[in-house]
Amino acid sequence: MAKKSQWTLVGKHKLELSNLEKVLFPDDGITKAEIIEYYLKIAPTLLQHIKGRALTLIRFPDGITGENFYQKNRPEWAPAWLEFVKLGKEEKKDYIIATEPASLVWLANLASLELHQLHSRKPDFEHPDYMVFDLDPPEGYDFSKLVTLAADLRNFIESFGYSCFVKTTGGKGIHICCPLEPRWDFHTVFEAAQAIALPFTERFPKETTLHIKKDARKGRVLIDIFRIRSGQSIVSPYSLRGRNGAPVSMPLTWDELAHLKSPTEFNINNVLEKVVQNGDAWEGIGAFAVDIHTHRKTRVVKEKKLPPNRKHKTPEQLESYEKKRDFKKTPEPEARIIEGSGTSFVVHRHHASHLHYDLRLEQDGVLKSWAVPRGLPPHPGVKRLAVQTEDHPMKYLTFDGEIPKGQYGAGEMWIYALGKYQITKDKKDGFYFRLSSREVNGEYRIYKIKAKEWLLERVDTPQVNYLQDLIEPMLSGSADKPPVSNNFLHEVKWDGIRALIAVEDGQIRIRTRNQNDVTKQFPELTVTDKAFRATCGLFDGEIVCLDKSGKADFKKVIHRLMSTGETTIQKGMRSNPVHCYVFDCLYMDGRSLINEPLEKRREWLKDAIKADTPYRISEAVENGTALFEAAREFALEGIISKDKTSKYYPGKRSDQWLKVKVRSTRECVILGYNPGKGDRSVTFGGLHIAERSDTGFVYRGKVGTGFDDATIKEIFKQLKALKEIKKPIPDKVMDEKITN
């Protein structure tokens, strides 16, 4: 029987996919189509870790219950665009290199469930860029004990000056990876790993061993350092494993590992959601690369002032920098030569006469610099002008401060991103390079178009596109009173419409909590250049109408929300203008901010929002009790208390944000309901309510929260028993399609 197949386009490549309905995980009912879908969706994150690496595949053509085999050689019938490299003894093996989502789809179609990576990257395959410690426990070993042992090993490794990143293997073990500068061969790196592992096993002789043979381990955990040798591999981060449940080799933070109950907790069904909501735990791992401790030299930093009228390559590069500055007046570093690693970069946010960003890459002992007026490109397809400026000294990597008025480049300068970079491909007119840092992690291309003008573009796709994806707002918990801890900031709870405002190259898109686009309802909020000091950004806020006393009027803003005709919208804008109180910033000019603490995000927010526009900063105070009493006095809805250190968790409810309502009640009647969705599809989603007045009923809006399951069922039972009345009030009720 002929194989069932279909053609699909992935990026620029047309692929033939076969036997999509074939079940590869029989106990779980997981098909090849689902495997392909997983690798395609996780590709932006997975490729950050494996792009440029030689891969060993484990294929399961008949599923995990059938035979499986390792494959290192690229098949002869592989497509011409699939990149490979000759490695091994006498360079006889053509190792596949995954460079784009199409590569992963093609491999998944071969039932390559597992991807295993060698420890070096193109173009330098002889020098590993990390050291790995594989904790391999015996059968039946308590996983919580393994976690404790991993924490002990981490502390020991870090005493040698390394940063430790951890992941599950997708089996019963744990991998600890320590990023390295790729300067040393495999044997030298192995010796460095051995110099750490040996004293550790001597410290814990009853729990650990370096003996490979199982009969010599005697129930102890193998600290496997032998995988770091040339030609060896480890399972790649985010790779599936060919085992029941389709587990994944999952990068974690150390805190997440401490709370992990099972090494196979993460699988094909929950990994993507975690990455989208929490980010990649190994984000910017390359920025933490160091030399191996056995070959570190105590460097005596030699600084030289720029010698007058003396030709020398590096000082000459800094002549222009020095001539433009008076170092008696500016805090900028002087034109001195300092030896660097050759791989450092920094991006500055520079408030000069015109706000711009400065991209600086270490080359030839200085920082090659470009002014990028509109910031780093957020995703492929966007090109940014980059104007080459004078070379800067290496100490500019850590410069953060204000250049005084009257000096060249006067204005405040912030470090926007700081880390390591690698040139991945040289071109005649420029080069490709990968940035690795906690702030920015991506691959870019820069090329010259004329004189000092270059174009900068991003070539890889981010896992989350904050400007175009449907991002959900973070939700708060509840409390009866404000927390008294000094770790909290407190804001007014605005009685309006929760909205996420996406800004991209002069365009604004406004979406409610339910992802309904309401941009056209609020034309006064589409003032990009006037309101925002950013080319791209995603902001969280509340849209309100204010009465004469400055209090939010919920009825008026709902009326604005429900306006659909152009004439009605324009009339509403004149009679009931809205303001948007912005209280958070998730993304700005090429950089995600969700993992920054709230205090830091608010700094960026204050810098990004201009004054005297419909957008206003939602002010925060430290005295929550006083603010709550003021809210009570002025009959406001309440306050929101937020932990200063809290990250932003899209779509999640967290007690790091607490809603503290002023308890006031009104007697209302239920007019009707909207059908429920999801878990409430058999009952109601929201109840339409009205308040009695002297002239009849006044519509007060819709409420859908605060009910337990029993109450929901009882209310719905009573509603279904009532006789339907057409148009019980003259007011127009909230449209489910546009309401939040």
Image (tube, grey):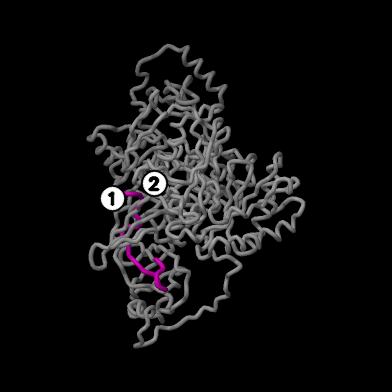
- In this view of the protein, can residue 201 be seen by the observer? yes
Separation of disc 1 and disc 2 at Cα? Answer: 30 Å
Q: Which mark is residue 389?
A: none
Q: Quadrant of residue 74?
A: top left
Image quadrant in which the N terminus is located: top left
Q: Which residue lies furthest to the right in this view?
A: 206
Q: Which of the two marks, 1 or 2, is nearer to us in this view?
A: 2
Q: Give the range drawn in magenta.
A: 361-380
In the picture, which quadrant includes the C terminus? top left
Closer to us: 231 or 730 = 231
Q: Which of 387 and 222 is in front in this view?
A: 222
Q: In this view, does 169 lie to the left or right of 495?
A: right
Residue 324's x, y, as percent?
A: 33, 78
Which disc number belongs to residue 506? 1
Q: What element carries label 1?
A: loop
Percent coordinates x, y for residue 475 in the rendering: 50, 40
- Asked whether residue 584 appears in the rendered view, the answer is no
Image: 521 above or below 224: above
Front-most of residues 65 and 681: 65
Which residue appears at 57% of the width and 33% of the height?
245
Whichever of labels 1 and 2 marks the residue nearer the N terminus, that label is 2
Q: Is residue 413 above or below residue 38?
A: below
Looking at the image, residue 198 lies above or below residue 522:
below
Is residue 376 in the magenta section? yes
